[in-house]
Image: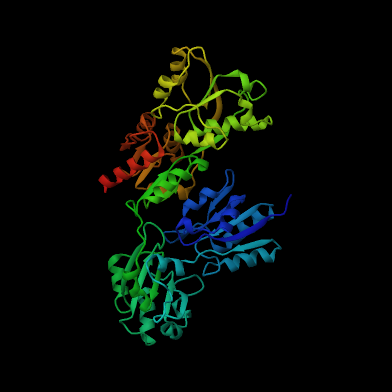
Amino acid sequence: MSAGHAWIVGAGPGDPGLITVAAVRAIEQADAVLYDALVNPALLRYVRPGAELVFVGKRSGKHAMSQAEIEALLVKLTLEGKRVVRLKGGDPFVFGRGGEEALACRRVGIGYTIIPGITSAIAGPAYAGIPVTHRGVASNFMVVTGNDQGDSPSSVDWDAAARADTLIILMGVSSLPDCMTRLMAEGAPASRPVACVRWGTRPDQEVLRGTVGTIADLSRERGLESPVVTVVGDVADLSEQLAWFEPGPLAGKRVVVTRARAQSSELAARFEALGAFVVEAPVIGISHRHDDLVADERVASRWDWIVFTSANGVEAFFAALRATGRDSRALGTTQVAVIGDATRAALSAHGIEADFSPSRATSECLAAELPRIAGARVLLPVSALTDDRLADALRKRGGLIEQVTAYENLLEPLDDERKRAIAEAHAIAFTSASTARNLREALDGQPLSAGTKLVSIGPQTSTAVREAFGRVDAEAAEPSIESLAAATQEALAWGS
């Protein structure tokens, strides 16, 4: 067995764009990832297929695992020879208990690497337009914890805190009244500016402004909940002048993406650009089937057309070619057709530009518009779930059709954390009939909220969504990622 290794990794403050390159590299090669509640689920898209995902965070006052259990699991998996990433919100050494986990590894002789992350203590205020230092206003800052296991407001040097130009309190929303009382007791004026930043850097960021004397009451009236970074000092007043972060039209909305993990990035990026908080729930796994695919020396002359109806079909076909030591050059003069832009992009990644694509990305248009079909030999590498409608339509035009199962859509289970996120979602975007059927099965009877908008990429998908959930709230005007994102935005706009 190879020696395992542990990476204790800072995931950053919430915006997935703030993850470090080193952190992404660690996640991509991990055999197991233990992640917290403060980790943006979008970062899990970097986890490779087949890697183990374990949620070890805290929800609604309840820990999925105790700190001792987390350390024991980290040690156990690493001793099994696995590459294990302990993914923690913010920076693991800023009130993140990363030092305790590193010591647990050191005690049993496990190799480990520390990868710092951008701390919410600085990033949260920055996204609210608050610099923690500013010429002529603040030349120093102090970071304390308001409510952390093993520490409490009483363990803070409040005399020093009251004298700091900028005081940053992490995890202190529940103890905010006590913190402000202690500051005033040490001489901090009740008029000193304060800003509370909830979920800083995320699309659902919330900023509450007040003073040392008023912020506790304002927080209670607003119903402010963790996680919150509290900034005390004159720099908090700069927020109104320097505010710059504009999350977008879907700010605060949670959108579920159900595509296979390897294919979800483009759709997720669309929603994130609109300000949505994306929940990736990949209920589909892809398994290539090479048995029936011809990939030997006959490839160059067997077909006149290869017609790809999905990016998965492209990947499965070229995986079969690679398995025989071949690449795109083996196709010779065979022409290639694709159904739409996503399939075209997948084909282009293998060095081939499509010879044809239909005016609309539908099977009906593809069957009607594919040129020079009479007497042509046509390969259709498709999913095991694909019906014969396209093949039959091409046969009616005189094509000699060879439809081959190139890949299977497998059900991917959902853990409790993903199910919880789906239950809280404002919208679910379905990219295929399989995603609808598989989500229904993966939820195992858990109902969807009546307020959750169900949005489909096209007619066939809509039929499957209705069969699975009894309704469809919106359908994309065109079967494309861009149109699906637009339909979701529209559904959420009129549904709010």
For image coordinates 43% across by 74% down, the residue present is 132
Residue lying furthest bottom = 187
In this rendering, would 233 be left or right of 382? Answer: left
Q: 404 or 136: nearer the eye?
A: 136
Q: Compared to 401, does 444 lie above or below?
A: below
For image coordinates 70% across by 63% down, the residue present is 108
Q: Compared to 188, does 81 lie above or below?
A: above
From the top left corner, tell me how far across and down residue 367 is, in percent: 43, 20
Q: Quadrant of residue 3?
A: bottom right
Q: Is residue 270 visible?
A: yes
Q: Is residue 408 visible?
A: no
Q: Quadrant of residue 437?
A: top left
Q: 207 or 359: nearer the eye?
A: 359
From the top left corner, tell me how far across and down residue 261 is, in percent: 51, 43
From the top left corner, tell me how far across and down residue 128 is, in percent: 37, 66
Q: How was this image coloured?
A: rainbow
